[in-house]
Amino acid sequence: MSLSLSPAVPARTSVLGRVVSALAALWLATCLAGCGAINRVPSLEEQAKSSWSEVQNQYQRRADLIPNLVETVKGYTKQEQETLTRVTEARAKATSIQVDASTVSDPEKFKQFQEAQNQLSGALGRLLASVEAYPDLKSNQNFLALQSQLEGTENRIAVARRDYIQAVQAYNTEIRTIPGRWVASWFYPEAKPMETFTSTPGAERAPNVKF
């Protein structure tokens, strides 16, 4: 009787292949860890999320200023009720959209957030423009204080958006190019590209709140 060893050969070859693959992966991981590449993806992701939190903080700061601004303007501008209503409604819509860290990886939610903030910016800009017709309001100390705070907040929003865009650009580039793409697929499969702000007419400028 003759014995055939052929079935065992593929099995040994398969085991050897897995061992070689594991050793190769270990070697590559060691190399990447040595040069810091293996930690670059999560580091850039955290930077982008931190920048996103600052964007949220500054938009919330603006939203918190608006009720006092509306009340102050209301006392001087009886015929601007429609403009005031639009600002109030735009603020309500913007603050009703629930956002968190996952929003930056959800194109639809991010688009809703940006559109709502853009609508609020437009409504607020029209309100501030209407104040030009009311000299007494323009000299009111409460209005002047709110104007100053709003101007500072708009500038901080612009800076926060810029920092976020830069952070997302660095992160997205990392997970889409080699070796970052390899690192993300092997060690961080949950890593997804993040959304960023798109340009809108006048978005690069804060609303004109100086008189």
Image (cartoon, helix red, strand yellow):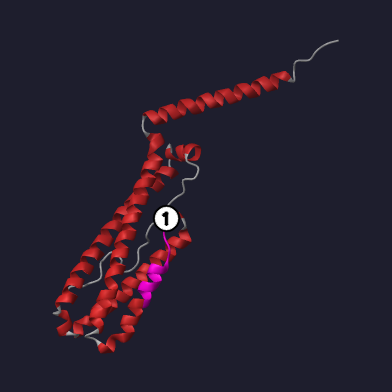
Which residue is depicted at the point 42% across and 55% down?
Answer: 104
Q: Residue 181, percent across and down?
A: 46, 40
* Residue annotated with mark 1: 104
User: Image height check: is 206 above or below 143?
Assistant: above
**Residue occupying the point 48% across, 37% down:** 187
Q: Give the image quarter of residue 87.
A: bottom left
Q: Is residue 11 left or right of residue 128?
A: right
Q: Position of residue 110 (x, y in %)?
A: 43, 61
Give the residue type at disc 1: Val
Helix, strand or loop: magenta stretch? helix
Residue 103 appearing in the image: yes
Vertical position of residue 181 compared to residue 86: above or below: above
Q: Residue at x 32, y 52 (%)?
A: 51
Please provide the residue range marked out in magenta: 89-101
Q: Label 1 neighbourhood size at 10 Å, few (<14), some (14-19), many (20+)? A: many
Query: Residue at 50% of width from left, 28% of height from top?
Result: 25
Residue 73 image-quadrant placement: bottom left
Quick one: quadrant of the N terminus? top right
| Residue 95 inside the magenta-drawn segment | yes
Q: Using residue 79 as the reference point, say whether residue 19 is left or right of it.
A: right
Give coordinates of residue 98: x percent, y percent.
43, 63
What is the count of numbered marks?
Answer: 1
User: Which residue, as the protein is rendered here, is positioned at the far bottom?
Assistant: 79
> Where, quadrant-wise, is the C terminus in this rendering?
bottom left
Vertical placement of 94 versus 78: above or below? above
Residue 131 magenta: no
Question: Foreground: 83 or 4?
Answer: 83
Can the viewer see residue 211 in this picture?
A: no
Specify the farthest residue to the top: 1
